[in-house]
Image (cartoon, rainbow, N blue to C red):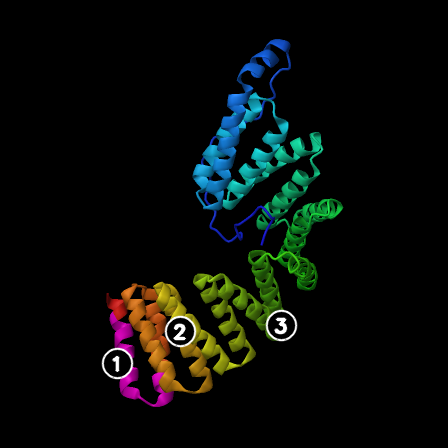
Amino acid sequence: MENQLLCYDGKRKSRLVGKVHQTLVPLADNSSQIKALGQISRPLAGEADRLLEQGVAQQKTNQLEAALESFNNALKIYTELQNLRRVGRVLCYLGLTVYSLGDLPQAIEYATRSLSVAQEIKDRHLEGQIRGILGNCYRHMGDAITAIEQGQQSLTIMRQLQDLAGEVAALNNLGLAYKAMGDLPSAIAYQQQSLSIVQTLSDPQSTEQILRNLGNAFYALGDYERAIQYYTQRLAIAQELGNRRLEGQILKNLSYACYALGDYPLAIEYGRARLMTARELGDRRAEEQSLGSIGVAFDALGDYANAIEYYDQRLMVARSIPDRRVEKQALSSLTTACYALGDYAKVMEYHEQSIAMRDR
């Protein structure tokens, strides 16, 4: 979970927004202009509010380019009306949207402008949110030190405002920044504080995301038992939410962690559950990966007959996708497993198929 306004996990591939920069130019304060604004402000303000609400809805449904257009149009009107509070809010949303699109420099530009407005109008809550967005931007740009500085300021503000949801986001983001810096113990400490608060808020989506981050941090530390504990809690939430795709992702984490721990039977159990989910969703890539991981676990047990069965299914899926890289991997796994089983005729058969691949 990132800043409380963010639905994006930060793993989307970067793509430039391609929108024209909107420069905020304050209007001169003179009596004739104020009089004119008084005549048009109500209908204009209503239109700007509509555009803002429309942009927020588009952002939530991942219509990011459409959201940018709505926010930019709202920004023009709010700027004309000299409504600084709304200008600051729209700039915040613009920063968030281009962040989600992966355009980090422009996200920082919008967020910095929004921060300037927030400080001018003394909107501490907006400032806390903006510093969270800035922290996430700098983290993704590889500047963990600045990310931590922004995150600490966001945390201080949210605590002063007694905004528990904001505090949860700030703590979690600090954890991500420390993880990016390679300080896993500090990352875990912040995320555990975040988890202890979010569990009082009846927010399953945020709870799941923090559990994911904690599980991943313990996995990176090599503490697979603790990773499994957090992944198991995530799985229960995904099942309560009825989110089958998320459930499949968590089953993958659990299977890999159990394999790393050396619990191959449990790795196979989670792998088979993931395989079933992938087939229900029609996710051929997840199906191929599940078949491969199950085969590897049977291989580790010395059960080469079952390993071959799953490798063979993986080969068929790879050819149906098609994916030559995975097909080559599957043939290599089959050749090795058949050799271990002493089935040299099959070894030659798969070896010949590998040679035939190179000739295609």
Evaluate whether residue 181 shows in this view.
no
Disc 2 marks which amino acid?
Gly
Question: Callout 3: 10 Å neighbours few (<14), some, many (20+)?
Answer: some
Q: Sort mark 2 into few (<14), some (14-19) or many (20+) by Cα contacts within 10 Å.
A: many
Label 2 vs label 3, nearer the camera: 3
Residue type pointed to by label 3: Arg
Which circle, 1 or 2, is nearer the viewer?
2
Q: Which residue is drawn at 56% across and 26% down?
A: 78
Dot 3: element: helix
Residue 255: image location, x then y, percent = 49, 73
What amino acid does circle 1 point to? Glu
Element on which disc 1 rests: helix
SS type, badge 2:
helix
Residue under the image location 48 percent in, 70 percent down = 251
Q: Mark 3 vs mark 1: which is more N-terminal?
A: 3
Where is residue 38? Give x, y as percent. Answer: 58, 16
Q: According to the image, label 1 marks what residue?
A: 349
Tell me if 140 is positioned left or right of 341 in this view.
right
Considering only vertical position in the picture, is 37 above or below 208? Answer: above
Q: Which residue is drawn at 46% across and 62% down?
A: 242
Q: In which quarter of the image is the C terminus?
A: bottom left
Residue on which the image places disc 2 = 292
